Amino acid sequence: MLDKGFGVEMDPRAKLVSILSHLDGNILAPSDVVLKTGLPRYEVLGAFHTLEALGIVSIVHSRNNYKLYTLSDLGRKVLKVLMDGGSLEDLVEKGIGASDSGNEIHDNAGLMGKAGEEAVEASSS
């Protein structure tokens, strides 16, 4: 399945949904996502760095610079909210999910540094 990336401008939300959708139930390298979405390589690679830091994607295999990823449980929740028309803010306000401790995003905020931690704290109060 090829997305609208080739020759058609996608908004940032559509790009994120496209990347996450392709990872859902699949194990892919960023280069596979580039081919499937038609998005520029630099955008996909940048997204993967951020998604990995936030725990939205999980590394399945890593050797040197080659990594294979899949969507994490948190990533599936993010994708569902985005596909239902919601926002990440909605997800944070609802505490991620009823079965979670509510700390999943907060725990990952440490990977973003002090500013990211403060942003998560502010959004949860």
Image (cartoon, rainbow, N blue to C red):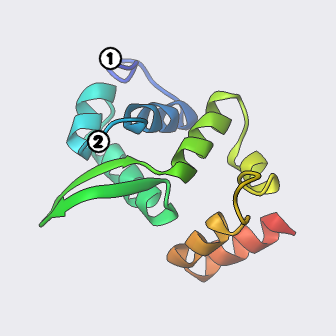
Determine which quarter of the picture holds residue 59: bottom left
Which percent across, then down, holds residue 69?
A: 31, 50
SS class of the residue under badge 2?
A: loop
Q: Specify the farthest residue to the front.
A: 99
The answer to whether mark 1 and mark 2 are in CB contact below 8 A is: no
Which percent across, then down, holds residue 13?
A: 57, 36
Determine which quarter of the picture holds residue 66: bottom left
Label whose residue precedes the other's in the sequence (1 or 2): 1
Which percent across, then down, holds residue 112?
A: 53, 73
SS class of the residue under badge 1?
A: loop
Q: Specify the farthest residue to the right.
A: 125
Please determine whether, in this image, residue 101 is positioned above or below residue 17: below
Marking on residue 89: none
- The residue pinned by badge 1 equals 1
Distance of label 1 from label 2 (alpha carbons): 15 Å
- The residue pinned by badge 2 equals 27
Please determine whether, in this image, residue 53 is positioned above or below residue 19: below
Which percent across, then down, holds residue 84?
A: 69, 28
Mark 2 packing: few (<14 Cα in 10 Å), some, or many (20+)? some
Comparing labels 1 and 2, the label whose residue is closer to the camera: 2
Q: Amino acid at mark 1?
A: Met
Q: Quadrant of the C terminus?
A: bottom right
Question: Quick check: 17 left or right of 22?
Answer: right
